[in-house]
Image (cartoon, rainbow, N blue to C red):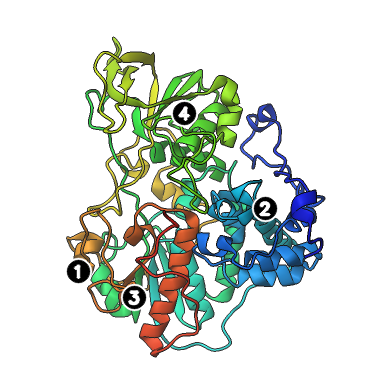
Amino acid sequence: MADRLAFLTTPSRPRERRAPQERLGDRHEVYREGALLPVIAGQAGRCMDCGLPFCHHACPLGNLVPDWNTLVAHDAWRSAAARLLATNNFPEFTGRLCPAPCESACVLAIDSDAVTIKNVELSIADRAWESGYDRPQPPERMTGQRVAVVGSGPAGLAAAQQLTRAGHTTTVYERADRIGGLLRYGIPPFRLEKHRLDRRIDQMRAEGTRFRTGVAVGRDVAADDLRARYDAVVVAVGATACRDLPVPGRGLPGVHQAMTYLTHANRVDEGDYAVSPLSAEGLDVVIVGGGDTAADCLGTALRQRAAAVTQLDINPRPPARRAPGQPWPVHPKVYRVTTSHEEAGGAAAEPRVFAATAVGFDAGPDGRLAAVRFAEAEQPGRRPLPGTECTVPAGLVLLALGFSGPEQDGPDRDDPEQDGPEQDGPSPADRADRPGRADRGDPADRGGGRARGGGLVGQLGLTIDPQGRLTRDDGFAAPADGVFVAGDAGRGQSLIVWAIAEGRAVAAAVDRYLRGSTELPAPIAPSDGPLTV
């Protein structure tokens, strides 16, 4: 350590954000560029280099946190980047998007402010790109074996990069017109600017990974034909089946899934639309849900100049500090003000209504959505309490209720590419002709003939567990030989660090299947989960 007593003498300093009003005038990332550099070495020096670093265990990637903290404190950035990239394929994503359970498990967090691990990680990741430490790593020799990865979210991309670097010819299939999954169309640019995603994809392409966009495996091409053409298939399609809210008025114009709304907004940033066909501008917006997706909708609606935004969270307001039932090192559920809530006015102008459940949507004289009825949610049980119902005006409702698992029979009915609002703008076919997409490739290299019935699940003989997840064994293998399941498709809705860890682990499983042994790291097993009491 640079200073063995720094954890006592150096105060914690968060990353500096731009002023909320400045942020609302654009969709760039909320943090000031380069703001960490003057302070990050001192923050890294606060690490105590514990004998039992629980930050390792809280992170499914097994990041070597004390190692790279020490190296940053000593200004050894190249070595710090090597340590970080040894366990994490995409630290520039996790450093921006992960809620940092590693910080909750920091020993300092027992009775003080944790080391700002996430900020140190982000500083290393950005410095690695700027200094050329994070270069393409093409394989020294090819194995002659071919792997198809279905899905291009963080799990699919991590698996593909690991397999390519191991020497397997790897092709990623993505049904959307751009690579990235929810990183592309679900995360707003004020949390992750897309040039960072494009940069990583370019690196993967330079290493030899192939990308095929606009190909829905199981619909555009037969999944079983794809399996016959490849030595192994990784299914990493995510958990994209949105939970719905079956209450009166759900079918009214103006009630939409959050992912539909965010996808359209992100397409504006990609240049597909001049203006989103599903905009909050001038409308009273009600967001139903309390997670990250709801916060992303809030930040997006504020930037679109919504007249007012109300967020209904069915959970009671969390405590300011750890509850007795969530002791260290568990990642606690506490009251947090996200950057989006800060932009709405922070705690002084809290847009969230806690312990509230929507019970119906009401139409106006024109037949469109006009109001949302909600009631206090009984705790526990979450049932509406009689006599507590009230109404809030609404011209747009966004359902951000999480995801139930992978889609089994094609896209959700509220998929913007299938059943979005009437709109002016480019069609999916028109968008596919624009520059910036991955190569769609020859039809012969896109997986064979037109798909038969049954979809991806039926054609590959996959099975579904009672929670709606694709089943796999302890080695990530699906019931069909040579097929593996990774990410939220098998785990259920989770964090980006778990998705990347699953991608790395499934790559090791596939490599072992193809070659009989592997030297690739496998940070987790399918049965592993977050730290709990």
Q: Nearer the viewer, mark 1 or mark 3?
A: 3
Asked which secondary structure carries label 4, the reply is loop
Q: Residues within 10 Å of mark 4 (few under 14, many from 20)?
A: some
Q: Earlier in the sequence, mark 2 or mark 3?
A: 2
Q: Earlier in the sequence, mark 3 or mark 4?
A: 4
> Is residue 229 found left or right of 259 in the rendered image?
left
Of residues 490 and 323, the one nearer the viewer is 323
How far from the left and from the top, in percent, is residue 431? 46, 48
Residue type at the position of mark 4: Ser
How far from the left and from the top, in percent, is residue 26? 64, 34
* Disc number for residue 475: 3
Residue type at the position of mark 1: Gly
Q: Could you tell me how far apart the alpha carbons at marks 1 and 3 are, in whole angstroms?
A: 17 Å
For the N terminus, the image quarter is bottom right
> Is residue 377 found left or right of 436 in the rendered image?
left
Q: Nearer the viewer, mark 2 or mark 1?
A: 2
Residue type at the position of mark 3: Gly
* Disc number for residue 279: 4
Q: Earlier in the sequence, mark 1 or mark 4?
A: 4
